[in-house]
Amino acid sequence: QVQLAESGGGSVQAGGSLRLSCAASGHIDSTYCMGWFRRQAPGKKREGVAAIDSDGRTVYADSVKGRFTISKDNAKNTLNLQMDGLKPEDTAMYYCGGGSCYAEYHLWGQGTQVTVSS
């Protein structure tokens, strides 16, 4: 099974930027949707941040619209999340996921921590 691995997390001050990347160990089915999710605290529900489908159409959570941009490079099997204008409330463990656009994703990475200080 394809493995996903996130990178690019770190600590930044409010207003700063980070770029997350998600690398796949193999070819991702071209029909899959891919997305970024985050869990803001242990025990809290994981929430969707942004997703992109096979045609490049994107959707964002209201809380990140206008600040985050999701993109993918099919040739390199990578998924990216450009995060600008970061806020303390963006602090979370960020995960990339992928799979059918009509069911729960079955591919998940281990996560990368993003910490935004005020």
Image (tube, rainbow, N blue to C red):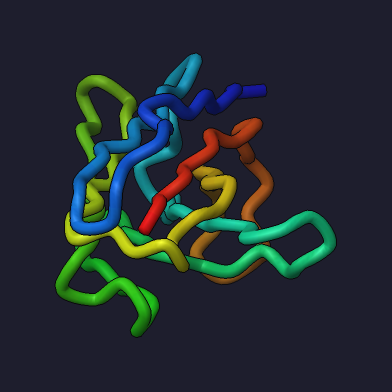
Residue sitting at the far front? 118
- Would you identify the image quadrant in which residue 110 lies? top right
Q: What's the residue at 34%, 64% (across, down)?
A: 87
What is the tally of numbered marks visible in this picture?
A: 0
Q: What's the residue at 55%, 44% (across, down)?
A: 95
Residue sitting at the far right? 43
Task: Judge left or right: residue 64 versus residue 109.
Answer: left
Q: Is residue 102 above or below residue 33?
A: below
Q: Is residue 65 above or below residue 81?
A: below
Task: Judge left or right: residue 94 versus residue 22.
Answer: right
Coordinates of residue 50 in the picture (x, y in percent):
37, 64
Task: Judge left or right: residue 113 versus residue 11.
Answer: right
Picture quarter with the N terminus? top right
Residue sitting at the far top? 25
Coordinates of residue 57 in the picture (x, y in percent):
21, 67
Residue sitting at the far bottom? 62
Picture quarter with the C terminus? bottom left
Q: Nearer the viewer, residue 118 or 64?
A: 118
- Would you identify the image quadrant in which residue 20 lies? top left
Coordinates of residue 13 in the picture (x, y in percent):
29, 47
Can residue 100 be seen?
yes
Q: Is residue 117 above or below residue 8?
A: below
Can residue 55 be seen?
no
Q: What's the residue at 55%, 53% (across, down)?
A: 92
Q: What's the residue at 49%, 64% (across, down)?
A: 101
Q: Nearer the viewer, residue 101 or 19?
A: 19
Coordinates of residue 39 in the picture (x, y in percent):
64, 58
